[in-house]
Image (cartoon, rainbow, N blue to C red):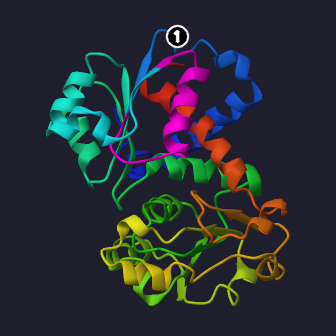
Amino acid sequence: MKDLIDILDLSTDEIDELIESANDIIKNPDNYREKCRYKKLATLFFEPSTRTRLSFEAAMYELGGNVIGFSEANSSSAAKGESVADTVRTVECYADIIAMRHPKEGAPTVASMKTKVPVINAGDGGHNHPTQTLTDLLTIKREIGRLDNLTIGLCGDLKFGRTVHSLIQAMVRYPNVKFIMISPKELRLPEYLINEVLLRNNVEFVETESLEDSISQLDILYMTRVQKERFFNEADYVRLKDTYVLTPEKLASAKQTMRVLHPLPRVNEISVEVDEDARACYFRQALNGKFIRMALILKLLGIK
């Protein structure tokens, strides 16, 4: 495998191997400090990001490598009208591997076709975010101990949430996984995912508008924010943005073994009072993102 554009580029065996590698990095960090010495990662972020960009950069630094790149389109030649293809063909002259975030779906695919160095999709529009999915899978495995026999609640913006779309595509390949989709009608999971992923794989799922009625059944509650930047109409965003807010009162009926994940950034969909609950693991999840990206960089560069 040269690139990671879509979570389906990875088999479950490869996912399990990356999780195992990340766990070894966590246990034995000193063994990895020089693995990418003299290697350079280019972070090409045409869209704002905190966790994804900084975790990629931290990952490369902790492997002993270096980082070049930009954090917004306006600080690159894209502001002058340069194409993605020309950008990556230039950047490959200076870097060994590229992590790209772009507001247009498919841009990282174009980049991977135009460059000889590995390309990692760090999020493209409302489409895919495979390294967030790897982060989620590592977190679930570390927190729950398994990736099968789970009931997963996906709550909030299921229509535009690329993290949700990628997670579903990854999890349907593990046995006995059930989904409870919790969202307002306007933000329901797209039909193509229901038909082509859930129904085609005979995966059990329920659609509901009630978090309270569902929370007691869950092993994982995956919260998402309603994303202002994906809306064409501000009035719709204002009307829907506070539909679901997780509070300690709502958590009271959840299992003690249940875990709350969130790809972050959080706006107000999880009360800060929930942060001290042992079931809240979204900041541990953010840390796991660094370790799984370290494992992925090593894999794509062919470093053992």
Residue 215 rendering spot, x and y as whole percentages:
71, 81
Q: Is residue 179 left or right of residue 139?
A: left
x 47%, y 86%: residue: 239
* Along the line of sight, the residue nearer the viewer: 241 or 41: 241
Quadrant in the picture for residue 162: bottom left
Q: How many marks?
A: 1
| Residue depicted at 46% across the width and 81% down the height | 238
Q: Is residue 25 left or right of residue 6?
A: right
Element on which disc 1 rests:
loop
Q: Which stretch is magenta? A: 44-66
Horizontal side of residue 31 vs 80, given as left or right: right
Question: Residue 138 location, x and y as percent?
Answer: 64, 47
Task: Identify whether 241 is placed above or below 282.
Answer: below
Mark 1 closeness class: few <14, some 14–19, many ≥20 residues within 10 Å: some
Q: Which amino acid, by three-letter code, is at mark 1?
A: Arg
Quadrant of the image containing the C terminus: top right
Is residue 52 rendered magenta in the image? yes
Q: Is residue 141 visible?
A: no
Does residue 20 show up? yes
| Placement of 132 over or under 1, stated as above or below | below
Q: Quadrant of the N terminus?
A: top left
Q: Is residue 111 magenta?
A: no
In the picture, measured across the screen, residue 249 lies left or right of residue 139, that is right
Instruction: Please name the residue that numbered disc 1 is placed on.
Output: 37
Give the residue displayed 51% in from the left and 25% down from the top: 298
Using the image, determine if residue 250 lies above or below residue 286.
Answer: below
Horizontal and vertical percent position of residue 273:
80, 68
Residue 197 higher or lower than 148, as above or below? below
Residue 108's x, y, as percent?
29, 43
